[in-house]
Amino acid sequence: MTVFGGRGMVATSQPLAAQVGLDILKKGGNAIDAAIATAATLTVVEPTSNGIGGDAFAIVWIKGEIHGLNASGPSPQAISIDAVKERGHVEMPKHGLIPVTVPGAPAAWAALSNRFGKLTLKDVLEPAIEYAEKGYPISPVLSHMWEEAYSQYIQKKGEEFKPWFKTFAPEGRSPRVGEIWHSRDHARTLELIAETNAQSFYKGELADKIDIFSRQNGGFLRKEDLASYSTEWVDPIKVNYKGYDVWEIPPNGSGMIALMALNILKELNIEEKDSIDTYHKQIEAMKLAYVDGLKYITERHHMGVTIEQLLSDTYAKTRRSLITEEAIKPLPGTPLQSGTVYLATADDEGNMVSYIQSNFKGFGSGIVVPETGISLQNRGWSFSLDKNHFNRLEPGKKTYHTIIPGFLTKDNQPVGPFGVMGGAMQPQGHVQVVMNLIDFNLNPQAALDTPRWKWVSDNTIEVEPHFPDHIAQGLSRKGHRIVKKVDSLSFGRGQIIIRDPETGVLSGGSEPRTDGTVVAW
């Protein structure tokens, strides 16, 4: 059910976090304050997807202007391809201290608060601190994700993984639905971040604890890496899709994949939503955009091609010409010739925020810094150890990033923030949601409810359990290999807020695939 409101709205994957954001609005905070408070609370009430030791990105609409924030962190200065291979790895490991990169989330909170907030950082982090200190009951999807993570980490035997169990499985198992979980270490860390404007995390007591634990357990991350980190304010990039500007954060984020796909699709004849032809064209465009993204996207100055080349109409036309009636095996083009939690907020001043935050895969690296509750991300897992790859591992480099906030405007006016979290599903979810809103005129909730598909590799397409059988069969006849999944958890979890330009009324939707909600004022 689409939720409507007039003075403010918050949408995210956990009802408790959404309510925190709304409370901040009622206390006089703006959409930016609400976003920070919600994000910090999500590190407590949904630690399975994000944490204090993760990264963040944001798109902010305020006072008639759009701003982008890249709060992803680089690899440690001490790491290298040779150093990782010397430890017996032919690929970047998924867990442990090796894939840990500099966390950007605490710096994101401080940067947003300093530039745009009305309340102090201490004010907006107070609710998250209280939930960490006093605890909260575990919700159903959260419990399921926690149990999945526990089953993975229980197989890890190294000493470095023991703090994770002490923090997140204190009873020798994952928490069950309705049980109360709290972390006083987490609360104390949030207090230090609030009191020092995040400086403790990068240059003070918390940085020292991260550095000591990393050194003791063979990690590459050092206090010097933390101390030298700063967030990056960026200009969001866009394509115009049928009269709407669709905005994403530029690389190293993967939002450009969604823009490339929409650039291909915008000149194709899309007649009706529930047709085999529509799904086929969406899938083919996504495949072509995704293989380009996987080849080229990394930190911007390492890409080898420019954003303008990849988003040019000329290149889109070249890629569009490859779409036929049959499924193709996608290959990267040559443009030189021409996973996460998401939240959206809005206030009565017209400010709106699209914000995303992640530890990457579940809890991340499986590494928790003792006595802090800081679960470190494993974003470095995305790096390639192939020295010829654009996204190769290098010291102090930001890797290809899956998490992407989205935003819509029309005629230089805000339409609203949107996002779909979930690893490789994210740009695919963005395309499907944008088309549901623009091409098929669906309301925010209906745009999220629609059954989804996900390109995996070559011609393999996964679909949700309730994906229409006749569409799946028709796509199969076109050469797609359709795999129906038994649940919907891997198909993204998103939120949307839309503002009516004439009345200012807000309408919002939240994902049926998670415990999320929309709250309005």
Image: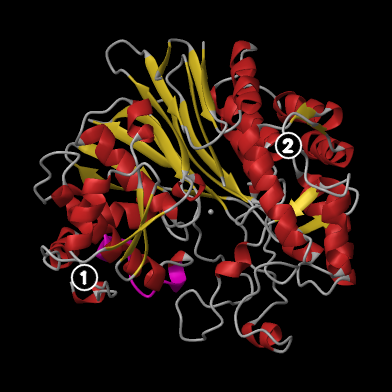
Q: Quadrant of residue 333?
A: bottom left
Q: Which residue is identified by label 1?
A: 328
The residue depicted at 61 percent of the width and 30 percent of the height is 14
Q: Which residue is identified by label 2?
A: 44
Please state the horizontal and vertical placement of residue 420, each as a whole percent of the image.
Answer: 44, 43
Please state the horizontal and vertical placement of residue 68, each as a whole percent of the image.
Answer: 46, 44
Q: Is residue 443 magenta?
A: no
The residue depicted at 16 percent of the width and 58 percent of the height is 313
Q: Nearer the viewer, residue 239 or 381?
A: 381
Q: Amino acid at mark 1?
A: Ile
What are the residue bounds of the magenta stretch? 301-311
Instruction: State how far apart marks 1 and 2 are (Cα).
Output: 44 Å
Q: Is residue 303 magenta?
A: yes
Q: Secondary structure at mark 2?
A: helix
Please state the horizontal and vertical placement of residue 108, each as a whole percent of the image.
Answer: 62, 43
Q: Is residue 497 above or below residue 173?
A: above
Q: Quadrant of residue 184?
A: top right
Pick the quarter of the image with the N terminus.
top left
Front label number (1 vs 2):
1
The residue depicted at 64 percent of the width and 34 percent of the height is 140
Q: Choose the circle earlier in sequence order: 1 or 2.
A: 2
Q: Secondary structure at mark 1?
A: loop
Q: Amino acid at mark 2?
A: Val
